[in-house]
Image (cartoon, grey):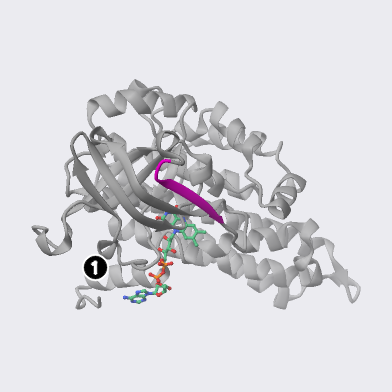
Amino acid sequence: MTESADLAPIRASVRALCANFPGEYWRRLDRERAYPEEFVAALTKAGFLAALIPEEYGGSGLSIHAAAAIMEEIQASGCNGAACHAQMYTMGTLLRHGSIAQKKRYLPAIARGELRLQAFGVTEPTSGTDTLSLRTTAVRSGDAYVIDGQKIWTSRAEHSDLMLLLARTTPREQAKSRTAGLSVFLVDMREVAGKGLTIRPIRTMMNHATTEVFFENMRVPADSLVGAEGEGFRYILSGMNAERILIAAECIGDAKWFIDEATAYARERVVFGRPIGQNQGVQFPIARAYVGMRAAELMVREAAALYEADKECGAEANMAKHLAAEASWAAADMCVQTHGGFGFAEEFDIERKFRETRLYTVAPISTNLILSHIAEHVLGLPRSY
Ligand SMILES: Cc1cc2nc3c(=O)[nH]c(=O)nc-3n(C[C@H](O)[C@H](O)[C@H](O)COP(=O)(O)OP(=O)(O)OC[C@H]3O[C@@H](n4cnc5c(N)ncnc54)[C@H](O)[C@@H]3O)c2cc1C
């Protein structure tokens, strides 16, 4: 499955932009656990983060293939798109399920980069992957909803104006079905900061700007509700395929970066009077990582093609994310091994990228949950949870 030639100029311009943000830039931010403001501003200004917003709302209306190519190139250049990838796809829920008024109000400003919608509050500390057990509630009170509860791992909340929030509007025992009773809200965090909304950063093994978020008697206007009350779980699921495809593309970019670094080093590094890459014990792991990356890349393209054709792609998006996350992690491990001791030195960037890419077999969905989806929905095995 070859890629359309139309994407070559997009790839080249992302590469050119990323060249302005070399390893030193990311190392400094990593040490300080600081947000890459300049990098995100440059991507926004170039319009890359508005790739999936339709032209009628001021975006570039590009395909998911183009969006995936953008994310892949960012990672393959040694940069880290996790700082802003959600700006690209979180708006999908609004685009598909929001009212015309909401779309007109928010999408053009998001496309221009004046508004950031890159915080996504689903995961909670007690329910974890079991989204239907989440405890945050939203209760209608006159022309508002009153929200109480807590989210965890709400990434970029401190660097976003808006948050897409999933909360329970009907108690579980009264909901008309197992998946009903949850609703999606588009919360303008600027309006509620200090008025029921508290955000606390969580330090993690990599520089990820993730947070825990507390809602205490937080009032949001009733028109913050996206789509119909009670249908939120379905809306959130419908956005997950795009998220998985784009994150899979990021993993492919990471894998390419690790393979390029390892290949270059294995050619240059001379030990026992010959390049280490001349030893099959060194070249086979690099070749194996390459084979794994290429196979995963094909699945990413297949998932993207189905998505683009508006066909069911849940299984393929999951498989793409799984294979790509495994491929990037295998490539990361190989790259450290190929570099020997230098793989651990900060200035080589390998240990940083190694920490960054580790995330993707856990988030946004963990390996086991993907495998149980395939087992149940593709192979027809009994539901395990
Ligand atoms: C850095 C970071 C950023 C994140 N960003 C966001 C964000 O922006 N917004 C958001 O909403 N969430 C975010 N998340 C949350 C992320 O999606 C979850 O961490 C992930 O889905 C796993 O959920 P959990 O941590 O609650 O693990 P748990 O659900 O507690 O699971 C722990 C382990 O048990 C396994 N497990 C659980 N149940 C089963 C089962 N039935 N069968 C087999 N295995 C099982 C899981 O696969 C996992 O390996 C982020 C997480 C991290 C670490």
Whether residue 168 can be seen here: yes
Residue at (47% x, 24% y) in the render = 112
Q: Position of residue 204 (x, y in %)?
A: 59, 61
Residue at (59% x, 55% y) in the render = 254
Magenta stretch contains residue 85: no
Q: Position of residue 342 (x, y in %)?
A: 80, 66
Tell me if the residue at label 1 has its CB under 8 Å from ligand 1: no
Secondary structure of the residue carrying numbered label 1: helix
Looking at the image, residue 55 lies above or below residue 120: above
Start-end of magenta stretch: 195-201
Whether residue 295 can be seen here: no
Q: Quadrant of residue 321?
A: bottom left
Crowding around mark 1 (Cα neighbors within 10 Å: few <14, some 14 to 19, many 20+) is: few
Magenta stretch contains residue 198: yes
Q: Nearer the viewer, residue 286 or 174?
A: 174
Residue at (38% x, 57% y) in the render = 150
Left or right of 356, for residue 188: left
Left or right of 34, for residue 122: left
Q: Quadrant of residue 206?
A: bottom right
Which quarter shows the C terminus? bottom left
Q: Position of residue 351 (x, y in %)?
A: 70, 63
Query: Which quarter of the frame holds ligand 1?
Result: bottom left
Q: Quadrant of residue 173?
A: bottom left
Q: Nearer the viewer, residue 114 or 136?
A: 136
The residue pinned by badge 1 equals 378
Q: Position of residue 62 (x, y in %)?
A: 41, 32
Left or right of 35, for residue 383: left
Q: Main secondary structure of the magenta part?
A: strand
Amino acid marked by disc 1: Val
Q: Nearer the viewer, residue 273 or 138?
A: 138
